[in-house]
Each structure stands twice: as structure tokens, then as C-alpha cells.
Amino acid sequence: MTLPRPVTDAIVARIGPFEVIPASGGHHAEVAARVIGRVRTVFVKAACSDFGVRSLRFEARVSRAVGASLSPAVEWQCEWGGWLVVAFECCDGPHADLSPGSPDLDLLASAVERLGRMPAPDLSLFSPTARLGFATADLEGATLVHTDLNRANLIVTAGGLRIVDWAMAAKAAPWLELALLVPWLIGSGHSPEQAEQWVARFPVWRATDAAVVADFASKNAAKWLRKAQENPVGWARDLADWTGRWSAYQRGKASAERL
């Protein structure tokens, strides 16, 4: 989608004539691209639909609240003719490798530990049930939860790991971040047992009742199976597979404990 001329003029005024390298997608905005200007390079998101504008405005507010140590800084934003344009710090580096034994897992552990101590900012964040689409026990809390720590949202920079795309952030119990991370670890090559061993390094996970975790895994798997049946795109089928494998592992553990 092409930005209107006044919006491109506003970008030129800030960074000079620019070159655009579109992002691969999945950014909750009509436009998402690396913008290379004469003055500096930024990552620009722009939206004009009602949903896109609300989502992008929310993401910018959360990113500012999180701060540049974990999230890309918001450089500037502007609005014109129904368009909202937000320029984020451009984070150079590869997406995190979450496969077993990867050194990036230590960076992720550090970031998750810091997130787990971060109170939710005074913003209208998603509730756990609204974010998940289902209710389960012990989800309520006062912690900021990103809710989508897949490797595409994790960039390894010279300054450390940066987490991008805060458009679905919630206020919840900190164990939810770990529960939502388990399927992504499985999708990166961990067995369900290995994934649970990884998240078990966090005291908040060890303190969460096993029945609560099992209930969450079951309901999350059912949700993604339904979504994959309704819209059988690759990423939905993958999540149905990974969440299903975790739920099956949980059921197997419960059966073994009853013997």
C-alpha cells in the first residue's frame, strides 16, 4: 500500500530522501518497512484502517512504557488524513535462534526474567481472557505480558535482545508469558519435556499449580486446532501441532502420576 504524499513528505522532513525495504508481514499495520533515509534508518509502521490505527497507537504506547532496553524506541509519530505513522528504532540483527543449545536462549531467559518483574503500565491493556479467547484459572495479575514471544519478534542486536510487536500486550499473571512461550520452543526443536524444563528455571513457573498448567495447555490446543480447521494456513497448522503436542504430553504426565 502506498502512503499519501503528505505522509511521505513528513518522513522526508525527518530523515531526508529515503529508500523502503518492505517487511515480510505480520505487523498489525497496512505498511511495515525498513526506511533508509539520508539522516538515519528507522522501522516505519503506518495504518489507516480503524483496527490498524487502534492497534498501532496501542503498540506505540506500550513500547514507550517498556523502554528501549527491551523494546525498540519510538523515534516519532505523525498523523494525516486518517493515517497514523510511527517510526521505531531500527534494530539490526538476526531473529533469535530458539533451538536447543542456542546461546540466544540465555538472552531470552534474561529478557523474560526482566519482563516478569515489570509492572503493567497504566494503559488499557488486554485482559488475559480477551487476549487468549478462552478463560482458565489463575490468569489475573499485574505484570506486563507480551504474549507473542515467537522468534520473529525477538531480534538479537549488538546491545542485547530486543522484543518487537507489542500490539497484543496484556496485563496478567507472569506465568502466562511462559505458557505461551512453550509452543514456540517446541516449534524450534524442543520436545515438550525439554520446553517445560526450560521454563522451569523461572520460580513463577515452578510455583504454578500443575493442574492449572494442564488446563491451560488443553484449552490452548483446542483453540488452535479449531483455528487451523477454520483457516488452514501454515502458521495456524503449526501452532495447532505444537500446542497439541504439549497438551498430549501434559495428559501423559497426568496419567503416569495416577498410576
Image: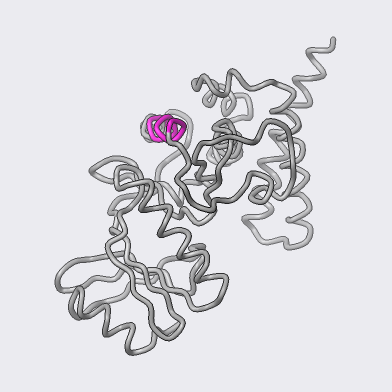
Residue 198 vertical position relative to residue 15 in the rendered view, above or below: above
Pick out the residue farthest to the front: 122
Q: Measuring 30% from the left and 47% from the top, which residue is drawn there?
A: 68
Residue 128 vertical position relative to residue 226 in the rendered view, above or below: above
Q: Measuring 40% from the left and 59% from the top, which residue is drawn there?
A: 60
Pick out the residue farthest to the right: 259
- Give percent across and percent down for residue 54: 52, 67
Q: Is residue 71 left or right of residue 229?
A: left
Q: Measuring 49% from the left and 20% from the top, which residue is drawn there?
A: 201
Magenta stretch bounds:
109-117
Which quarter of the rendered picture does the C terminus lie within?
top right
The residue lying toward the viewer, choosing from 119 and 206, is 119
The residue lying toward the viewer, choosing from 190 and 158, is 158
- Give percent across and percent down for residue 47: 47, 74
- Give percent across and percent down for residue 77: 33, 69
Reply yes or no: does residue 111 show up in magenta: yes
- Give percent across and percent down for residue 223: 75, 48
Q: Quadrant of residue 193?
A: top right
Reply yes or no: does residue 17 show up in magenta: no
